[in-house]
Amino acid sequence: MLILPGVRVARAQRVEPMEAAVFVVRILLGGLLLVAGGLKLGHPAELAAAIAGFRLLPAAIAGPLAVALPYFELLLGAYLAAGLFTRVVATVAAAQFLAYGVAIASAVARHIPANCGCFGPGDAAVADWPHVGLDLALAVAGAFVAWGAPGALAVDRKLRSA
């Protein structure tokens, strides 16, 4: 190895297991939100119908929510994947998954055959208890990321050291 005078060679930093775990979960959640938001994008009518199918919100709210939700999920996903504002974004994502779980549980308990619309108009998944469990597990994963934030390879880590 040739070392030139005055040139610093960067050494690989050791990544703690917790930082690695937070990184992996952060990337998985971010990727999931990016895919879900991307598949909903451009289909506000179908998403509004799916939201209205839960019979929880007034019809006047379903339309604007269907327009905004894909962009919100894309933003959350991008921020999580990058590790930017990780603690806040992961907390918001956890709350969002919890809200989805509550909405789906409400539909199941009221025997409403609602289509979740989680992954756009091509998603035929109906509200059921396993789906509630999945959303609650995603909420716990978001809380884990918020608790252990920012994890390895996060923009937040670079901003802190600057």
Image (cartoon, rainbow, N blue to C red):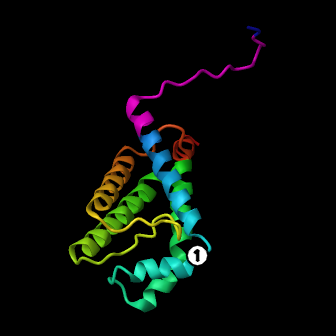
Residue 58 occupies quadrant: bottom left
Residue at image coords 34%, 59%: 135
Residue 154 percent coordinates (x, y): 53, 43
Is residue 91 inside the magenta stretch? Answer: no
Name the quarter where the N terminus is drawn. top right
The extreme left residue here reads 109
Q: Can residue 98 be seen in this view?
A: yes
Name the quarter where the C terminus is drawn. top right
Residue at image coords 31%, 65%: 101
Q: Is residue 65 visible?
A: no
- In the picture of the structure, the residue carrying the numbered disc 1 is 43
- Magenta residues? 3-21
Residue at image coords 43%, 44%: 25
Bin the neighbour count of mark 1 within 10 Å (Cα to Cα): few under 14, some 14-19, many 20 and up. Answer: some
What amino acid is at disc 1?
A: His
Residue 19 percent coordinates (x, y): 43, 35
Residue 23 percent coordinates (x, y): 47, 40
Lateral position of residue 79 relative to residue 142, left or right: right
On screen, residue 159 above or below 9: below
